[in-house]
Image: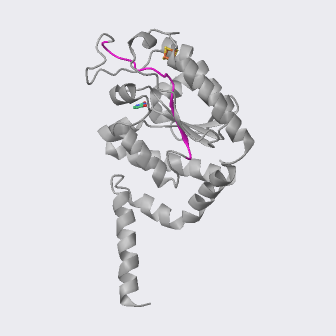
Amino acid sequence: MKQSEYLKILNLVKISLKEYSDWGENEIYKYLVADTKASKSILQATKQKTFSTEILYSKEELGKLREEINSCKKCPLGESRLNAVFGVGSPSADLIFVGEGPGYDEDHKGEPFIGKAGHLLTKIIEAMGQTRETVYIANIVKCHPMIDPSNSEKRANDRPPTPEEMSVCRNYLDMQLEIIKPKIIVTLGASSTKGLLNNKEPISQIRGLVKEYKGIKLMPTYHPAALLRNPNLKKFVWEDMKKVMHFLDTREI
Ligand code: SF4
Ligand code: URA
């Protein structure tokens, strides 16, 4: 190979490493190189599914549910929200991420995980060889839980949803799961994990363990906001995501 070709390849490698540098995990780079085949097969499978009538049907059903949620007032969060945040992604995703609830940015735009934590979640998804379009992203409650519900313009006004709010809203997530039929759920953080599993142990103990919700495999892991506060937790999330990738590829976990 000519030296100029070597340099070209080296440059490409540098660019892709830079893309994932926010993660700061060498292991990810190794994994990406070793397992581009696995990532490719995930993308291929997603592409093949794109045109089936089943997907058109799921799209329509999700659309109807989205409209219902937009006018929902079944719990007090419906009174203070600006926008209900339904979910984004593929109507036939094999992998669904479930967060805690919309924050300021999500409440203003009506889309989940678009703030700082959302940016990191997007990086995690991309490091897994997927995109926000090939997976599905939702929350355990669809409206912004605020410390001061009288002021939706206030920053740092987020709080976790209460068990009551989660149990009222969970019905909507259940319907999303019925329509999308994912093969695996990743719960992000203690709230959504508790909301689905009703577990007693802290997230530090339950993360990485394979659980089930309504017959669907479930992997609890840390919330990306926790990774922003404590980057040492990133390696654990990556361990958990490797298990998820292996499951998606082999259906074994
Ligand atoms: Fe309805 Fe859920 Fe919003 Fe409560 S959080 S108002 S149950 S959509
Ligand atoms: N945090 C969450 O749990 N969900 C979002 O949609 C945004 C931030």
Q: Is residue 120 left or right of residue 153?
A: right
- Residue 3's image quarter? bottom left
Ligand 2: image quarter: top left
Image coordinates for residue 104, horizontal then vertical, percent:
33, 26
- Extent of the magenta region: 134-148
Q: Is residue 27 left or right of residue 150?
A: right
Main secondary-structure element of the magenta-colored stretch: loop
214, above or below 25, in the image = above
Q: Nearer the viewer, residue 33 or 59?
A: 59
Image coordinates for residue 138, horizontal then vertical, percent:
51, 32
Image coordinates for residue 172, horizontal then vertical, percent:
59, 21
Q: Residue furthest right?
A: 53
Where's the N terminus, which quadrant? bottom left
- Scheme of colours in the image: one colour
- Residue 93's image quarter? top right
Q: Residue furthest bottom?
A: 2
Q: Is residue 252 visible?
A: no
Image coordinates for residue 32, horizontal then vertical, percent:
48, 62
81, above or below 43, in the image = above
Magenta stretch holds residue 243: no
Residue at the image position 66 percent from the left and 48 percent from the top: 50
Residue at the image position 55 percent from the left and 13 percent from the top: 168
Q: Nearer the viewer, residue 167 or 198?
A: 167
Q: Is residue 42 visible?
A: yes
Residue at the image position 48 percent from the left and 22 percent from the top: 142
Q: Is residue 193 left or right of residue 17?
A: right
Mark count: 0
Magenta stretch holds residue 135: yes
